Image (spheres, grey):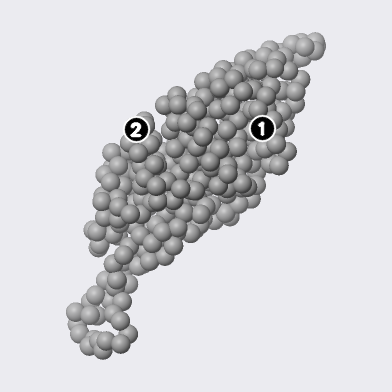
């Protein structure tokens, strides 16, 4: 659903710019997330990628997914274990070789900084070239491999993205964030079992990683393993009690499992706390109609989605299935509601009220 850019010698940090999430309309800082489906950045309030943010841009409501910044909040890791500095207590003779090494190091740093900037700007083609320039100077740079892989994921060059992330993992197999990034690539390829394996590796190292739990839950939904998905979403909600996304996802799966009352209760809590969370309002409208046939309440929730553009986005059922991982029953509930809503509007335009 989301992941993080890698900066050598530093902990991972949110390196995004101040932008506005189109789904929750909350101003928020996001980093760059990889996403082949316009989910490049994530809203930290909802902890999901937001479609069409960054310049669109992972997110979920996803690095949703978001993407290079599921965009994610809270993943930390030092990616490059190589040491370039000479210990201070050892005298260093400034030979031509040393000066050349320092010049190469400065050039590498400058190119890395430029590549990060282009990635954060969602300039994917230019960013791909920039990361390749870094790797031309330093072919074993695991951070550059991971970041180029995420950029190529955003460009939907899935084979190239997979090759980069696999190489990055080979170089730094103990780094959880690399396994999570690799899991994103497998997800984009529809390879659920390898994706599940990568997210599980993350959780073996970081059991309370909300991002890995949500990502694994998404894969479980795609596999039709709804009980397992619910367990992962519940664990993510427990790990990060302030996150809205795992609770909304819990509600989606509960509706799929026939627990409509629990689903409605959770969604009402979510929209009360995050009144501009468009996807939660859409989900609540769907389950209110589909499970309870309460059209007036469902229509009220739909009307609370703040603008027509967002309502149109929430009406894209295939996107909700693929990117937001809505289960089949919720997709059908929303389809039925939208058909009725359209019929109601036609009747009202003719001078009648349903």
Q: Residues within 10 Å of mark 1 (few under 14, many from 20)?
A: many
Badges 2 and 1: C-beta atoms under 8 Å apart?
no
The crowding category of the residue bearing disc 2, from other C-alpha atoms within 10 Å (few below 14, some 14 to 19, many at least 20), is: some
Image height of 49 relative to 144, above or below: above
* Near-viewer residue (209 or 34): 209
Q: Is residue 153 above or below residue 251?
A: below
Q: Who's the residue at 36% across and 42% down the image?
A: 198
Q: Which of the marked residues, 2 or 1, is nearer the chain's N terminus?
A: 2
Q: How many marks?
A: 2
Residue holding disc 2: 193
The residue beneath circle 1 is: 267
In the rendering, at what x and y percent does residue 273 appear? 71, 42
Q: Secondary structure at mark 1?
A: helix
Secondary-structure class at tag 2: helix
Residue 73 appears in the picture as rendered: yes
Mark 2 to mark 1 CA distance (whole Å): 30 Å
Percent coordinates x, y for residue 140 in the rendering: 24, 59
Residue at x-position 80% and y-position 12% = 353
199 up-or-down from 301: above or below = below
Give the residue drawn at x 56%, y 38%: 234
Q: For the point 56% across and 22% down, which residue is it?
A: 257
Q: Quadrant of the C terminus?
A: top right
Residue 295 pos. (x, y %): 73, 18
């Amino acid at each position: 659903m989301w992941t993080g850019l890698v900066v050598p010698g530093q902990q991972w940090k949110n390196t995004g710019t101040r932008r506005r999430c189109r789904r929750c309309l909350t101003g928020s800082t996001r980093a760059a997330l990889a996403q082949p489906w316009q989910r490049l950045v994530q809203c930290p309030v909802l902890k999901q990628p937001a479609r069409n943010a960054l310049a669109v841009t992972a997110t979920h409501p996803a690095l949703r997914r978001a993407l290079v910044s599921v965009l994610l909040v809270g993943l930390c890791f030092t990616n490059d274990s190589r040491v370039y500095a000479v210990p201070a207590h050892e005298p260093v003779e400034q030979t031509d070789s040393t000066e050349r090494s320092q010049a190469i190091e400065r050039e590498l740093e400058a190119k890395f900084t430029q590549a990060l900037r282009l990635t954060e700007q969602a300039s994917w083609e230019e960013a791909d070239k920039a990361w390749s320039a870094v790797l031309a100077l330093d072919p074993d740079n695991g951070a550059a491999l991971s970041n180029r892989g995420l950029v190529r994921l955003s460009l939907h060059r899935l084979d190239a993205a997979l090759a980069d992330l696999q190489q990055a993992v080979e170089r730094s197999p103990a780094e959880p964030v690399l396994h999570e990034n690799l899991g994103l690539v497998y997800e984009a390829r529809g390879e659920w079992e390898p994706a599940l394996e990568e997210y599980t590796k993350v959780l073996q190292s970081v059991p309370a990683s909300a991002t890995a739990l949500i990502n694994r839950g998404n894969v479980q939904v795609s596999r039709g393993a709804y009980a397992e998905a619910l367990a992962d979403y519940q664990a993510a909600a427990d790990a990060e009690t302030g996150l809205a996304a795992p609770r909304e996802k819990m509600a989606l799966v509960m509706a799929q499992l026939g627990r409509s009352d629990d689903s409605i209760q959770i969604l009402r809590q979510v929209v009360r706390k995050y009144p501009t969370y468009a996807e939660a309002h859409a989900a609540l409208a769907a389950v209110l109609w589909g499970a309870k046939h309460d059209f007036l309440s469902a229509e009220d929730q739909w009307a609370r989605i703040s603008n027509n553009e967002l309502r149109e986005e929430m009406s894209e059922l295939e996107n909700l299935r693929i990117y937001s991982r809505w289960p089949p029953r919720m997709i059908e509930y929303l389809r039925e509601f939208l058909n009725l809503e359209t019929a109601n509007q036609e009747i009202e335009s003719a001078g009648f009220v349903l």
